Image: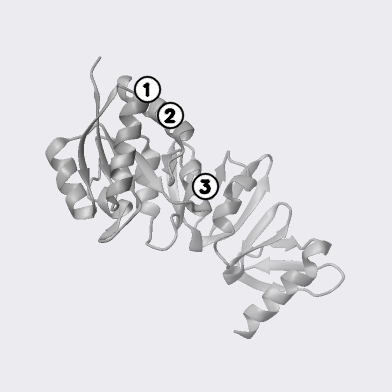
Amino acid sequence: MKKIRAVVIDDEYLNRDLISQIVVKISDNYVIIGQAEDVESGFELIQSVEPDVVFLDIKMPDGTGFDLLKQFPNPGFEVVFITGFDEYAIKAFEFNALDYILKPIDQSKLTKTLIKVQDRIFRKEVSSNHLKDIVLQYNGGNVISKIPVHFKDKVYLINIDDIISIQTHEGYTLFVINNDKNKFVSSKQLADYEFIIGSFPNFIRLNKSVYVNINFVNNYTKGQVCEVTLTNNTSFEVSRRKKAEILEILDRKMED
């Protein structure tokens, strides 16, 4: 059986060495053919040895793993991200169906990841398009600045700042976009997007089924029934439980 050729790119020597040792210990189908410590040397290494899989650190002295991947528009290799415990980053990887391992190394998680990667390589599957998506999304601050939404036969990368509202709609999630006649529908549930939305302070949850972007709020009422009207003339009722919180946020926004 042909060996899977792997490289490890991490700025810490001990991490590189540990990952290299654990990988070949777990599976004799893998062979480590090179190591690199930063983006520049990692790029040169991948170019020269053309690995089947890259174990890639996210934060390095001269940039990030995403900066490295941007130099390979159509990567012919699998990628397993190496990350410290960052709940947001981990959820982003899971959301985009990407492989990752945590520092310190979790051997049980790594074992499962190696099996998944090995299976894809031996079946000669093309690397997931989600890898390209997340590289395009990365903006240096958040791992996600765009949301990939399947619409008809395409996947659209929607700028989060352009979203007017996100709501549950007939068992799906409906995205309404500023200056766009299309309403994008995702088969994912609203709850699947909450970790993304929650990291952007301009989104507020009005009730259990609706988030709105406060930058597109046109007006709101303060009566017994509190309603928020957006710039596209859509109105949503605020739940009684959240009324005081939402009014405080909106009042503060209007004062700015």
In the picture shown, does residue 115 fall above or below 39? above
Q: Of the residues shown, which amino acid type is indicated by label 3?
A: Lys
Residue 2, picture quadrant: top left
For disc 2, the neighbor class at 10 Å (few under 14, some 14 to 19, many from 20) is: some
Q: Residue 124 at what x, y percent from top left?
A: 30, 23
Q: Secondary structure at mark 1?
A: helix
Residue 179 appears in the rendering: no
Residue at the disc numbered 3: 91
Q: Secondary structure at mark 2?
A: helix
Q: Say which label, 1 or 3, has the lower sequence index.
A: 3
User: How are the residues colored?
Assistant: one colour
Near-viewer residue (12 or 187) = 12
Q: Residue 145 at what x, y percent from top left?
A: 45, 58
Most extreme residue toward the right is: 224
Most extreme residue toward the bottom is: 255
Q: Say which label, 1 or 2, has the lower sequence index.
A: 2
In the picture shown, does residue 6 fall above or below 156? above
For disc 3, the neighbor class at 10 Å (few under 14, some 14 to 19, many from 20) is: some
